[in-house]
Structure formats: structure tokens, C-alpha cells
Image (tube, rainbow, N blue to C red):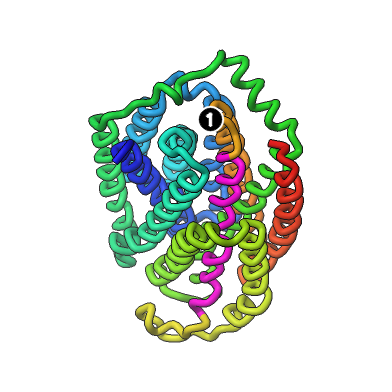
Amino acid sequence: MKNIGIKISLYLNYFVFAILLNSVGIVILKSQKNYGVDEVQASILEAFKDMPIAIVSFFIASFLPRIGYRKAMLIGLSLVTLACISMYFGNSFDNAKILFATVGVSFALIKVSVYSLIGTVTETKKEHNALMSSIEGFFMVGIALAYFLFPAFNNENDRDSWLNVYWLLAGLSFLSFLFLLFIKFEETEAAAGANLKDDFLQMFKLMAKLLTVIFVISVFLFVMIEQGILSWLPTFNTKVLHLPENISIMMASILAVSLAIGRLIAGIVTKKVNWIWVLTFCIISAMLLVTFVLPKTVGLEVKNIETLSDIPLIGFAFPLIGLFIAPIYPLLNSIVLSALPKNLQSSMTGLIVIFSALGGTLGSRITGWLFKNEGPEKAFYFTLIPMTLLLISFFILKKITAKDEI
């Protein structure tokens, strides 16, 4: 199959970073217990992860084709390998900050490379949509695995046992590095371009378009919702449902699994149903879950929980919100990226990564503040505000794209 080695590498790299990036919710929970920080202090880990993504993406997105996508991804993988080893030996909240800052810088290199390469290894919009959705779905599988990997290494009688997982993560990063190093990799088309000044001008020219403004706002709002829930669900399970630590972490995997399933289903449904109706159904369903299911989860009385099977069924209901919010991100990205010329896709990818990072940081910080000041029982209700704004943005985006203004 054409470009099969490159495609496998894209999956592998995204899988490794899925585990690392979305372990932030687990580390937030462990930081409160092991390092003595409160909810607001712990939420800063999201900023250490996301702000480097935004900053690095801004400066390298357009220039990255000249560096070379293979070289950029190799740099990213080598950095996180060292960061994982450093976290094991450092074992402090400051080292956790360094870990996520390094992961953020590296993921900026990886994500811009992956999104740009999708455009070079696919030939039609349907192929682009399918590969984008499947890679993002595989990303969710990595997230789900994180919620089982960390408890597998975590012994509640040994407060430092969970750090052993970083040896495994360092090993996965290094194996991905070796695979990428030795596969056949051609990127001549991706490396074409003008000069650095023109590349930055392209990014700013894209920002001047109404379509781009509405699009990045939509991306920002979605990631605010997704990361706010993903990062704080383990803490919610511990403080509201009063579940043991390992079970709280594993319960959060339901959200990640539902996100993966939702994205895979969306890849099938959107072949027959217009994207606007898919996204409208998804966001309204998510809003109904928050409005009607979350109150029953908050009011749940949980006693003597030792395994997942001991939890009443209603306790599993809220994490299923992932089924409905899952299709939003890859569909929005694919709609815009597949409509752009390939020489502009790197610049647009940079904007996607920047506003995704800003949305993730703000979402986690706001949720952390709400957990501390409004109580963990009420924090997730505030997701209804960005959900409503997101619904409005879909129809504005539909109206603009219908006029072929890309």
C-alpha cells in the first residue's frame, strides 16, 4: 500500500502522545495527594502542557516543512523519552511541570507534522476525512489505555509506585523513534514553499478570513469542553462519587473509550449525512446529558466500591458524553483542511494547534477554579455555556462554507 510506513508512523506517534498528554488528569489527582497542592495549583499543569504547544506551533508551523517532518517528529520523540526518565527520578510537582512542558513542545512538532502529512498521503476529501477520523480515533484509544496503565503501576500503599509507568512510556517513545528513523520517508511535496516571512504572512492572512475566525473559535470552544472534562473527571470521581483512587482513574477511561467509538462512528455516518446535522445532533445530545443525567450522577450514593462492577449503572452514564462530543473536533478540522491547498495546510494546522492549546488551558483552569470555589458537584454544569456558543458557531460556519469563501 502507498505510504503505508508513513501512515503507521503517524498512528504510532499519535498513540504515544495520547497517553502522555491526557495523563494530565491523573497527575493532577496524584499531585493533590502526593505533592500537597490544591485544585487551582494543580490545574496549572494543563497550562504547562498547552501553552508550549501554542507558542511553539506559532513559530514553527509554517517553517516546519523546511526542517522536515521526519526530523521534527524525531526531535519530539527524543525529548519526551528523556522527560519521562526525568519524571521518574525527579518525583516532584516541579518535575511534573517540566514533563508536561516538554510534552507540549514535542506535541507541537508531532501534531503539525501529522496533520500536514495527512494531506500529502491522501488524494481525495473522503480519504482525508477517513484518515483524519481514524487517527483521532486511535488517539482516543491511547487516552483510554492511559487510564488503565497508571492504575496498573499504582499501589496505594506505596506512594511512589505509579512513577514506574514512566519507564514504559519512555520505552514506547524510543520504539516509535526507531521505527520512524528506519522507514522509507518521502516528503518532497511537503517541503515545498516560499520563505519564512511569506509563511508567517500566510498564517496571518488566513486569520483575516471570517471562515478562519469562526473555525478557530469553534476549535477553541470544543477543546475547552473536552479538556475541562477529561482533566477533571478522575478528581470528580474521587471527590463526588467517593471512589477509590485506582477505580476513579479507570472510570475516567469510559470517557476516552466513548470518544474513540464516537469518532469511528462519525467517520461512517458522515459519508451519508451532512456534517452540520451530525454536529448539531451531537452537541444537543451532550447538552441533554449535562442537564438531565449529571444531576443523577451527583446525587448517587456509592458505598463499598472495590471493583467497577460495584458501581450503579447511572454512575457510568455521564462519561458517555464522549460519544456525542467526539465527532466535533476531527470533522471541523477535516472540513477546513481538505478544502485548502496543500501549501496552506501547514499554516492552518498551526492555527488549529494554537487555539486547541489555548482552549485546553483555559478549560482546565476554569474547571479547576470551579472545583475549588463552586464545588466539584457543580463544576461540569458550566460546560453548557461553551456548548451553546459552539452550536451557534456550527451554523455560522455552514453558512460561510456554503458560499465557497475558503
Q: Which residue is at the front of the view, 42 or 131?
A: 131
Q: Position of residue 345 (x, y in %)?
A: 55, 32
Q: Which residue is at the front of the view, 165 or 54?
A: 54
For residue 213, side relative to residue 307 (left or right): right
Q: Which residue is at the front of the view, 160 or 258?
A: 258
Q: Quadrant of residue 159?
A: bottom left
Q: Quadrant of residue 191?
A: top left
**Which residue is rendered at x = 61% and y = 15% of the image?**
197
**Which residue is rendered at x = 54% and y = 52% of the image?**
42
Q: Quarter of the image containing the C terminus?
A: top right
Q: Which residue is at the front of the view, 340 or 272?
A: 272
Residue 32 sits inside the magenta stretch: no
Residue 177, compared with residue 270, is above or below; it is: above
Q: Secondary structure at mark 1?
A: helix
Q: Label 1: which residue? A: 342
Residue 322 sits inside the magenta stretch: yes
**Which residue is rendered at x = 44% and y = 45% of the image?**
96
Q: Position of residue 152 (x, y in %)?
A: 29, 63
Q: Is residue 86 visible?
A: no
Residue 279, compared with residue 110, is above or below; it is: below
For residue 84, side relative to residue 340 (left or right): left
Q: Quadrant of residue 210?
A: top right
Q: Quarter of the image containing the N terminus?
A: top left
Q: Amino acid at mark 1?
A: Lys
Q: Position of residue 341 (x, y in %)?
A: 57, 30
**Which residue is rendered at x = 42% and y = 41% of the image?**
99
Q: Main secondary structure of the magenta part?
A: helix
Residue 62, compared with residue 254, is above or below; it is: above
Q: Position of residue 174 (x, y in %)?
A: 27, 38
Q: Which residues are magenta?
A: 315-338
Q: Tally the numbered discs.
A: 1
